[in-house]
Amino acid sequence: MRVGAKARFWIPVLFLLGVGAYTGYSLIKAHFIIDVTRIPQYDFSESIPSLRGGIYCKAPGGTAYPLVKSTPCWEFRLDPVAMTQVVVRAKGMKNPRTIRAQAATIADVLNLPRSQLFDMVKNYSARYQLLGITDDRRAYDILSNRSLVGGVIIRNTDVRRHYEGKRLCHVLGGVNRERSGVDGIESRYNKALSGIPGKISGKKDGRRRVISDKIEEKIPPVPGSDIYLTIDHTIQKIAEEELKGGVSEFGSGAGWCVVLDVKSGKVLAMASFPDYSPEYYNKATPEERRNRAIGFNYEPGSVMKVITAAAAVDAGFAHAGTVYSTDRAEKDARGEFKYYKLPNDSHAMGPKLTLKDAIVHSSNIVIGKLGFDFGAERLYSYFEKFGFGRPTGIELPGEEGGIVRNFHKWDKATRSRAPIGQGVSVTAIQLASAYQAIANDGIRNVPSIIDKIVDAKGNDVLDASRVKRERVISVHAAREMRKMMLGVAAAGGTARRAKLDGYSVAGKTGTAQKARKDGRGYEPGLYCATFCGIVPSGVISPMPGGPAAPPEVVILVTLDFDEKRPFHQGGNSAGPVFKRIAERTMRYLGVTPDCPQEGLDDLEF
């Protein structure tokens, strides 16, 4: 059969039209019809970071005050190569946005110089350049909009924010780039604060985007626990301000302060100087990071005399009126020297002194004799009871234990030097804790800085049995010691400048010459000046015939002098700093004054 001319024309045309239609359909399907079964897919499994718990302290009224919290935010990075491979076109616009216009948008949203962004998009060798980290929702909405910008990679993260700057830096510590705690509470309770990471697994497409309907497993993260400190926000502020002021005024190289609640042993304030910014932990020097209130051993000097006297009174070996000769060369019945190399006294106070006067005037000779006669073994046992020679167990890393050699290793010189705070080393928290026992009628509470830990479900997960109390000396001995200590911060004592208006103070000074770093002798002219006081004293009644006002706080202040200074004595430098902290703290706590305005000068006990 012959094919006509029209047929010969239309057969090729129809064939070509069919081929063209099929080709067009294939192209349309490839570009507009998404078939996930034919897109390259990749298995993935990723960890979902948990939100780190916060750290809080106490504010007026007992409310919780945030010190450190993690804020959810986004991390933005730029991939210049990806930026050139993506067509960015706003809806309804004919022409795509230029890379320069995209860079300008990124710069404006993140408050970066446009010139900086223009340089970044040209640098194809540096992929995934950090643009910034922010919790600004507007920035996220714009930079995640692929009709406005391309090449921006967004990752969920969080930022650790310190709301009080340097305040409490040594207690809090910091967080490193791996989101792990370093120093302080951040390190000690890193596991509790970190929480439990979540998990997600499934498939991603060729552009590494998660395919929502191909998620195989998703376990949400568990946020970290919140930690509540015993620190009082106002008292901490007072302590830091006055300590820094004292370091500057008296020219010391460093200083530290501890404020303890008498009844519970809880830390109300802990300050150390020099300090640093926790948000820039890696830029701080080791000396700036050091928490000297717990991590620094030093000879206490005469503040240790109170501990020696308390031990003797508790054992019935001596009392406030026991009289001692101030003659260093005192001889026994056989005409031999009774004491070996007694230390000198810096005050001429007459041929005899009572134990009470020896505390008020800080007699090295009298307390040296008392310790020598009391005996090394008994004195050492009381040092142990008061907590010296071992860490207190406070919930902070890096605590030192002090240095108190076993009494078997005491030579004749140590028997009269250890009682006055020479040849032994303590930490500030140990010393404050020992005074807390005297303030608390002989019961020592192991110092603590953690009030509670609350998990993500609101449960208190702190072991309540952690609180430890032990009787160190009798009620009688504790009260007798506080009476003896009254005269120190008075007109005739060694800490006249620590005297408070309206409040009685049971305290003691300490001026300890600093030991050489090589352990051979002492540095000439360099001292650690200390004053530790109990306010109120707990032995003065605000009303005639009424009960004594109970002690509220123990405050310890030490200034560490690395240069010769005129006011290196405990009463002349640490004493005034103590006074300022105590006065402001009493007003803040609303403690009723217990002492007449004229002070204790005319009172006898």
Image (tube, rainbow, N blue to C red):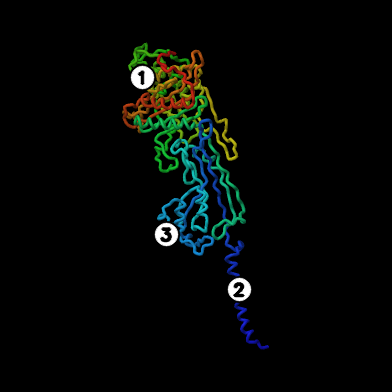
Instruction: Work out whether 331 lies above or below 89.
Output: above
Instruction: Work out whether 77 lies above or below 13.
Output: above
Relative to 566, 447 lies left or right: right
Asked whether 332 or 302 is in front, the reply is 302
Furthest residue toward front: 92
Q: Secondary structure at mark 3?
A: helix
> Depth-wise, is mark 3 or mark 1 nearer the camera?
3
Considering only order in the chain, which callout, 1 or 2, is on the residue closer to the N terminus?
Answer: 2
Q: CA distance from mark 2 to mark 3?
A: 43 Å
Disc marking residue 21 = 2
Relative to 484, 348 lies left or right: left
Quarter holding the C terminus is top left
> Depth-wise, is mark 2 or mark 3 nearer the camera?
2
Task: Report the residue marked by disc 1.
Answer: 340
Q: Are marks 2 and 1 in contact (CB under 8 Å)?
A: no
Considering only order in the chain, which callout, 3 or 2, is on the residue closer to the N terminus?
Answer: 2
Q: Are marks 3 and 1 in contact (CB under 8 Å)?
A: no
- The answer, for residue 216, to whether it is visible in the render is yes
Mark 2 belongs to which amino acid?
Ala
Which corner quadrant of the image does residue 169 belong to? top left
Relative image position of residue 552 (x, y in whole percent): 49, 24
Q: Secondary structure at mark 1?
A: loop
Mark 3 belongs to which amino acid?
Lys
Q: CA distance from mark 2 to mark 1?
A: 115 Å
Mark 1 belongs to which amino acid?
Tyr
Disc marking residue 122 = 3
**Pointer 3 local density, CA inside 10 Å: few below 14, some 14–19, many at least 20:** few
**Pointer 2 local density, CA inside 10 Å: few below 14, some 14–19, many at least 20:** few
Furthest residue toward top: 333
